[in-house]
Amino acid sequence: MFKRLILEDSSAIYVITAFVTAATIFCTITWRALRMPRAEVEKFAQLPFTTDADERHDPSA
Amino acid sequence: MPGQKITIEYNDRVVRQFLLATLIWGAVGMLVGLLIAAQLNFWQLNFALPWLTFGRLRPLHTNAVIFAFVGNMMFAGIYYSTQRLVKARLASDFLSALHFWGWQLIIVAAAITLPLGYSRGKEYAELIWPISLAVVFIWVVFAVNFFWTLARRREPALYVALWFYIATIVTVAMLYIVNHLSIPTSLLHSYPVFSGVQDALVQWWYGHNAVAFFLTTPILGIMYYFLPKAAERPVYSYRLSVVHFWSLVFVYIWAGPHHLLNTTLPDWLQNLGVTFSLMLWAPSWGGMLNGLLTLRGAWHKLRTDPVLKFFAAGVTFYGMATFEGPLLSIKSVNALAHYTDWIIGHVHAGTLGWNGFMAAGMIYWLLPRLWNKPLYSTALANLHFWIGTVGILLYVAAMWTSGITQGLMLNATIEHGTVLAYPNFLDTLTTIRPMMLMRVVGGTLYLTGWFLLAYNFYRTIRGAAPVNGTIEVYEETPNPEARLSLARAFFSAPTLFAVLGVGFATLWMLGTDLVSTAGLVGSLACLIAAYALIPSRSKAWGDWYEKLLLNALPFTLLTFVAVAAGGLIQIIPTVLVQKAQNVEDRIQVPYTPLELAGRDLYVSEGCYNCHSQMIRTLVPDVLRYGDYSRLGESIYDHPYQWGSKRTGPDLARVGGKYPNIWHLRHMEDPRAISAGSNMPTYPWLLTHKLDASVLPAKIKVQRMLGVPYGPLSAQQIFDSADDQAKGIAKDLRAAGAYVAADTEIVALIAYLQTLGKSVPVPPKAAHP
C-alpha cells in the first residue's frame, strides 16, 4: 500500500491536499472567531485583569 | 448565585524558585555557549580534555538553554499566570515542590553525564535513558499539577494563554516519549528503536516541535498574559489570538521534514514539510502583530519601562525568526543555508531575542511583585536591554554573513558546473573566521547583559521578604449546563467531520487503487455533508464550540488529536516503508562488532555536532563528497547520524578515502594533517582501552531492533573484534605508528573506514 511513496513521483497530490486541509481549518476557525459575540470577546480579553483590584501581596509564611 | 467568600493565597514560592533557577541556569547555559563559540575560534580551548571538547559541550549548551533556562522560565510563567487566570492556588504544594526539585536534579544529572560522553546521539535528545525517564516522570507531575489546578478553578472560562499551556503539555509529552523510545543495553546506554530515515524523521518531528512547543507555544501563552499586564491594556484582538492558536497548533506539527530537504527522505514528505512551513507565516505573524498591537497607545511607555522594551523587542524577534524559518524551508534557499552558520543565526535570533528577552521582561515584571519591593535599578535594566540587543544583532549578523559565505563557497562550481571552485573545505573555514570571532563578541555582550540582570535581581531581593499574592473570591456552584462530556466532545459532528475528513484525505494520498479512490470519495462526501449541514446545524455547532472552551479535559484531548494527526500521518508510512525489502539500489552492510564499538565512540564524542553523514542530491555535494546517499545506506543506523551542521566535511563516504594512519594522525593532531583546522585533538583515544565486554549485549539489542546479525556467541563477538583490531594495529605499525590493538582509536578507525561501504541490492530483493 505504501510502496509508491518511495517509488513514484506523485508528491503534488500531498501538497494540494495538505494545503486544502489546512486552509479549511484556518477558514473555519477564522469564521468562528469572527462570529464570537463582542461581549464574550471583551470578557475573555479582560480575564488577565479580573483579579488585579483584589490581589494583595502578603509576606509568605 | 455567589456563594461563600473565601481567601486564596497563591503558591508563589514555587514561582520564585523557578525564577531563581532560570537566572542561574541561563547564565550557565550561555556561558557554555560562549565557551564552545570560542573553541571554534581557538581550538586550544578544548584543553585536550575529553569532558571539555566541543562535541561533548555543545549538547550541554543546547540542553541547558532549552530545558534548564527556558524550561524553568516557562514553569515560572505558567504557574504564576495560571493561578491568577483560574483564581485558584496550585492544586498540590507537594507536586509543585517535586516538580521544581525533580527538574533541577535532572539538569544536574545532564550537566554531569553529557560532558562525560554519555549521549544518545540525537540533537536535543541526548540524555541517556534513565534521565529521559526522569524527564517524562517530572513532566507528568507538572501535567497532573496543572490539570488538577484547572479542575479546581473558580473561573469557568479558559483564557487563550491556558490553551497554549495545554498544547505545550500534551504535545511535548508525545514528542519526547516517541523520540526517546529506546532499548537499553546497560544502565547508561541504549539504542533508539528507530533507524536511518525513520529516526531522522522522528528526530526532526521532535526537534522542530521542541522549538514549536517548548520554545514557542508556552512563551506565546506567557506573552498573552504578561504583555497585556505590563501594557495595562487587554490584548489587541482576542479573535486573532483564537485564530493564532488553532492554526499554529495544527500547522506547526507538520513542518519537521524541512530539516531534511534534499536528503534521502521521500519526496512527498519533503514537499509536505515545505508546504506547511510556508503556511506557518500566517499564524506566526498574526501572533506577532497581535502582541505588538497590544502596545497601541502605550508605545510612549517604552522610553522608560524596561519590561515593555524587552517584550516589544522579544515579540519583534519572534516575528523575524518566524519569517526566516519558512524562508529557509524553501528548497533552493535550504540548499544554500542548510549545514551552515545561517541556521545557527536563525536559531539564535529566536532563542536570544524571543526566549531570552521574554524571560528578561517577565523577570523584571515579576521581581517587584514577588518580593514586594521596587526593582533595584531601572537604569541597569535599560542598560541590559541595549547591551543585549547589540549582542544579538552582532551575533545574528555574523552568523548570516558566515552562513551565506559558507553556502556560496561550498556550492560554487566552475567549468560549467563540473568542478568545485573551492575544493578544499578548509578554505571556507578560513574565510569565516572573522565572523566566528564576531559571534563571540556578540555572545559576550549578551551574557554581560544577563549578568546585569543577575546583579539587579540580587540587589532587589536582598533584604526583601518574599510575598505571596492573595485574593478573595466567591465560591460558585458550577453550571451543569456548561459541562461537555467526553462522549459529546468526540461524537459530535465537528469532531467527526474533521477526523473523517483528514482520515479519508490520508487514504487518498497514501493508498493505491481502491483505497485511494475510497479516500477521495470519502473526503468529498465529508466536505459536501458538512457544507450541506451548515445552515441547519451551525448554531448547535457554535454552542458545542463555546462549551468546549469551558471544558478543559475535552479541549485537551481534542488538541492532542490535532497535533498527533500530523505526526502519525508522516511517521507511520515511513516506518512501514523502511524495510530492507523495499530499499532500492544500495543497502548498508551491518557493522562488525569492532565497527559498532567505534560508532558508539563517534556518538559519544559528539562528532555529529560538526560532521554530517548525508550527501544531498545536489551537484556540489556529489562533487565534493561522492555519490548521493541512498535510503538503504543508513537503514541499520541506530541512531541515524545525518547531522545538521558541517563545521567539518561530510563523512558519509569517508571509508577507504584515506589510509588508517591518516585517521590516527588526524585524531591525534588535526592540524598536522589539515592546516588551519579547528577540530579538537583526541589524544585519549590512543591510550584509552576499548570496553569490548559490552558488545554482546549491544549486538543482542541490535538484533532485537532488526539488524541482521547472525547467531553470534559472545566469544565469537570478542574474537571478531579482536581479529579486526589486530589487523588495523598491524597496518598502523607498518605505517610507523605503534598503537595497542585494544585502544579506542582502533575501533573508531574501523568505523570510519566502513562509512559508505554499502552493497548493491540484489534484483530479487528490490522487486519482490
Image (spheres, coloured by chain):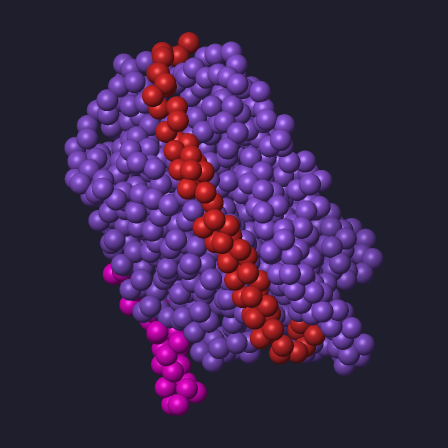
Q: Is residue B400 visible?
A: yes
Q: Within the magenta stretch, is there residue B413?
A: yes
Magenta range is B408-436
Q: Residue furthest top?
A: A61
Q: Quadrant of the C terminus of chain B?
A: bottom right
Q: In this image, B555 relative to B405: left or right?
A: right
Q: Name which residue lies at 68% across and 77% down.
A: A7
Q: In this image, B26 relative to B112: left or right?
A: left
Total marks placed: 0
Image colour for chain B is: purple
Q: Name which residue lies at 17% across and 40% down.
A: B300
Q: Position of residue B701 (x, y in %)?
A: 73, 50
Q: Residue furthest front?
A: B536
Q: Name which residue lies at 31% across and 69% down.
A: B405
Which one is in front, B430 or B735?
Answer: B430
Image colour for chain A is: red
Q: Is residue B314 visible?
A: no
Which one is in front, B35 or A50?
Answer: A50
Residue B377, by quadrant, is top left
Q: Position of residue B490 (x, y in %)?
A: 68, 45
Residue B197, by quadrant, is bottom right
Q: In this image, B39 relative to B582: left or right?
A: left
